[in-house]
Image: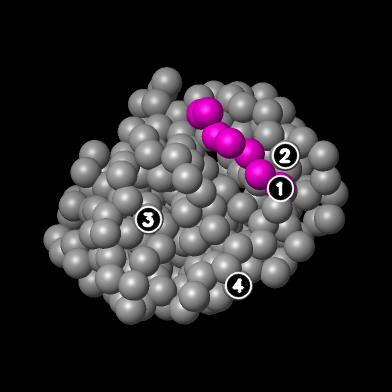
Amino acid sequence: MSSRTGSGLKGMDIETDTEATDADGPKNQDGGRPDLEPPARHMAELAGAVGDGQLGDRTPCPDYAVRDLLAHVSGLTVAFCAAAKKEFGPLTDTAPGTVPNPELAADWRTALPRQLADLIAAWHSPAAWEGETRAGGFTLPAVVAGRIALNELVVHGWDLARATGQRYAPDPASLGVSYALLGQPDSPTRAPAFGPAVGVARDAPFVDRVIGLSGRSPDWKP
């Protein structure tokens, strides 16, 4: 789960109406089933360009170096894949913050792209979006879990790009999903998981406004 400290699920006011509008940003009209493939593929591209010498660099997540962020992304990718398949167990039932962040696996350069491909395939199944599932120790509508998974990729993709000096180019549809999710009043996906929203000018790029809602400053630099 995206985090400074923990999950974006605890206490969530779950809504199944996914249509949200912004005066200057995309409108999410995905019927509740957004496509995780664009942000997952972008995450794979960003991770693939990380140099070994950058693994110890700081990131916008105060507690994470780049290696920790990559390990976190690997873990959440596997967990949300299990949530899509409704394969319940430790991966879906362990609350974030209750166990230490795992070490980055030695084979992460081959494992993470494979995990992201599995995530894409899992959420491409219509059955993944039906009924309820579990994530972070909570039971919630599967359609909400899928949107949270997408948002994790969007926000952490920005984290990784900014930490490693890469260009970040998220697809507009995914940004719209994140904006709708993070913009829910008092949404725990924003706080405490992300912290209070950071004020961003209304005429700022849409990606900056999404990142601001996540509790990050769009101006952050290593």
* Disc 1 element: loop
Name the residue carrying label 1.
16
| Mark 1 / mark 3, whichever is N-terminal | 1
Q: Are marks 1 and 2 in contact (CB under 8 Å)?
A: yes
The residue sitting at 40% across, 26% down in the picture is 97
Name the residue carrying label 3.
213
Name the residue carrying label 2.
141
The residue sitting at 33% across, 78% down in the picture is 203
Magenta-colored stretch includes residue 207? no
Type of residue at label 2?
Answer: Pro
Q: Are marks 1 and 3 in contact (CB under 8 Å)?
A: no
Can you see residue 115? Answer: no
Which percent across, then down, holds residue 143? 71, 48
Q: How many marks?
A: 4
The residue sitting at 42% across, 21% down in the picture is 98
Which percent across, then down, holds residue 163? 24, 62
| Rendered image coloring scheme | one colour
What is the crowding at mark 3: few (fewer than 14 residues within 10 Å), some, or many (at least 20)? many
Name the residue carrying label 4.
27
